[in-house]
Image: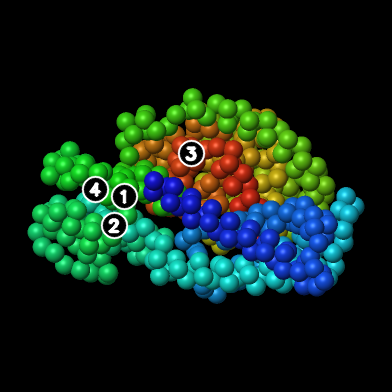
Amino acid sequence: MTDTIVKVKKALLVLGDLAAAYSSLYLTLLLRYRDGLNLEAWQSHLVPFTAIYLAWIVVFFISDLYNLNTARNTVDFRRRFFQALAINALIAVAFFYLNPAVAIAPKTNLIINIAVFAILAYFWRAIFNLAASHSIFANRVLFIGSQKKFQDIMPDLARGAYHDWKVVAVVDPQEIKEYRRDNVSFYKNTTPLSEIINQEKISTIVLGLSPEEHPRLGRELYDCIFAHSIAVVNLPKFYEIVTQRLPADLLSEYWFLENIKEMDKKFHDSAKAIADIALSIAFGAFFLATLPIIAAATLIDSGWPIFYTQNRVGRRGKIFKIIKYRTMYRDAELQGALWAKRNDARITRVGRLLRKTRLDELPQIINVLKTDMSFIGPRPERPEFVADLERMMPFYALRHLTRPGLTGWAQINYEYAASYEENLKKLQYDLYYIKNRSLLLDFKILLKTAGIVISRKGQ
């Protein structure tokens, strides 16, 4: 139920944008045909503009405009909204004037439609964001368990970073007094849950402990099934829903045995293998076309070699040689393997541009064709680091259940990891992908990667 609420809200955003789009088309034709909107004009515009509107939704998605955690009326939101709107205008112009299959060329209609859509969509989003920022639609959460455990495992939520979720009450079984701090009510362990639920208007209960260890709480939670329409989830599941990561330090081998179902992923893995071949052919042509330019720029900037090979750990721990454009100076690792880091001084001028646009990854198409890699999956790590990471991090080896990728869930959500703590966070994203991988999630990753490449946000 908790996950469903999030999906419903995102669906509401999409439907609102589509409603703004079709309303703008109706108003445009109404303004243009003042003697009365006829059916023929509506039908001739409906199909081509529908194609345009679907493309606009994709651009909004790439621009992170369906992220509920950033749905706020801020300067950053306005910047992303109007940037996406500008891209959408260019797409519409290209569609109508560079596509011979389209029978209409609506010059004035297109300008009016874009302007009306901009007004309707912006005000719709502003209203939605205002409601979200005032917690009208927020899930009101009651957390049961050690408040220290809650704040340690989810500090961003405790600070209010995920404004779609609002922790309004905490019941700590060890607490003996009631008090209020930072707009959160802390209740002593003897306060009846039904009283807290009614008083705080709770919609979700998060369990940071096992009810079996506290029989009274277990009985009260059982009674809540009948008395209240609320969702009850454990902390790992809640963490996964809110952050789209798996809390590796909260999980056990038994949890993974129950939740990692590789048999259910066979269709996905087979379909993705076919998609990898198709994408390799498409991007292979681009790789060959850009090779002379990138090679010449690299030679002028830092000399030979153009390519760089390195041992990486692949599926089921198999070692393979990854192929990349060289982006570091030739003597970058004379003292041994080092973590990549932000603003790395070892990166050449051309290399920095290649990394920002992700063009340095293009030669890995060869690795995909050799089936060492996929387009989407956990980033392949170096053997020198894997040995240490597997020793320090429980379940790190689970990353190797699937083929590594050129891009992945961790790459689009997190930058370079240069420490144990940062690698742990990246592992949480990788484990989320391993557990939830699907063609839909892969498509989402591809779109997000396209957005990173276009905006040059790579590292």
Q: Nearer the viewer, residue 53 or 362?
A: 53
Corner quadrant of residue 307: top right
Picture coordinates of residue 7, whole percent (x, y): 48, 50
Q: Which residue is mark 2?
A: 202
For disc 4, the marked residue is 227
Q: Earlier in the sequence, mark 2 or mark 4?
A: 2
Type of amino acid at the residue the image marks with label 4:
Ala
Residue 457 showing in the rendered view: no
Q: Residue furthest bottom?
A: 75
How many marks on residues? Answer: 4
- Tell me if residue 382 comes above or below residue 447 in the rendering: above
Q: Label 3 belongs to which residue?
A: 436
Q: Secondary structure at mark 2?
A: loop
Question: Residue at the spot x=52%, y=29% of the render?
Answer: 265
Tell me the CA gap for discs 1 and 4: 9 Å
Badge 1: few (under 14), some or many (20 or more) residues near its Cα, within 10 Å?
some
Q: Which mark is residue 89?
A: none
Q: Is residue 70 above or below residue 101?
A: below
